[in-house]
Amino acid sequence: MTNVDAQELAKFSEMAHRWWDTESEFRPLHQINPLRLDWIDERAALRGKAVLDVGCGGGILAESMARRGAQVTGIDLATKPLGVARLHALESGVDNVQYREIATEALAAESPAAFDVVTCMEMLEHVPDPASAVQACATLAKPGGWVFFSTLNRNPKAFAFAILGAEYVLRLLPRGTHEYARFIRPSELARWCREAGLSLQDTRGLQYNPLTRRYWLSGDTSVNYLVACRKAP
Ligand code: SAH
């Protein structure tokens, strides 16, 4: 049944021990985290909320949302990143985050409408059926709840920046991290959201300057982008 690519999980498990090394291949996630965290918090007001982080990996976003006062559950299907996430939370004394190895669709069947906020960042481009993952995220949100996604756009510029640039020229990411065919156009994501009963509230681009090595949010969604949606009340 499971909407998962075992090779993708193996890739993330292999590098799991470096997840919290801010100079490793996870540097980009560490760098963009404050940007996306603020963007999410400004909309969904995380403090006191029940939050689900889908495809949480080693817990960079999940733990940071817990630090903002949310009660966070992180799920993933890769075992090693979850182990790293649990250990990191323990070491840093963050006790309002818990991690589970369970498929998004399975949790949606088990706990529909259980979360005020659902985040699913940098995961959709690694799953065989992203529309099913979007539907499951929508099911997991309470009526009126927020659902956030981020992924990579599919066009020649995204290929040049996210694959040639990031994996071959700048070597920010290991070769093979991303597969171009799995990138998602904002119009496709918007349609899956609509079909899942989510209404689009906001879309932002994420830009990178390789000279300054800085990221910022912008109106340019041509490569990396984030969307904020709400489930009908
Ligand atoms: N969301 C985190 C990690 C992104 S890396 C962040 O942005 O910081 C992508 C993550 O998606 C990895 O942890 C990988 O194991 C997970 N993943 C890939 N396919 C998945 C699937 N089918 N179900 C759940 N998680 C998956």
Image (cartoon, rainbow, N blue to C red):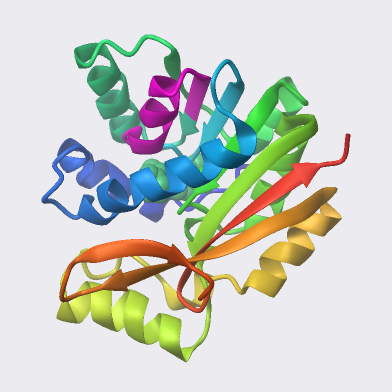
Q: In this image, 201 relative to 158: left or right? A: right
x 70%, y 73%: residue? 187
**Residue 9 visible in rendering:** no
Instruction: Tell whether 62 sits left or right of 120.
Output: left
Judge whether residue 186 is colored magenta.
no
Which quarter of the rendered picture does the N terminus lie within? top right
Q: Position of residue 191 (x, y in %)?
A: 78, 65
Q: Quadrant of the C terminus?
A: top right
Percent x, y for residue 98? 44, 16
- Image location of residue 45, percent across then percent down: 59, 30
Q: Residue at x 27, y 56 (%)?
A: 28
Which image quadrant is residue 111 in? top right
Of the pair 227 and 108, the residue shown nearer to us: 227
Q: Specify start and end residues of the magenta stretch as a single range.
A: 57-74
- Is 19 above or below relative to 154? above
Q: Quadrant of residue 99?
A: top left
- Residue extending farthest to the bottom is 156
In front of the other: 51 or 173:
51
- Which one is in front, 223 or 78? 223
Taking the image as shown, residue 232 lies to the left or right of residue 24, namely: right
Query: Does residue 219 lie above or below 230 as drawn?
Result: below
Residue drawn where x is 50% and y is 21% of the image:
72
Q: Is residue 88 above or below residue 152?
A: above
**Residue farthest to the front?**
42
Reply above or below: 162 against 78: below
Nearer-the-camera pick, 226 or 196:
226
Q: Tell me if residue 171 can be seen.
A: yes
Give the farthest residue toward the right: 233
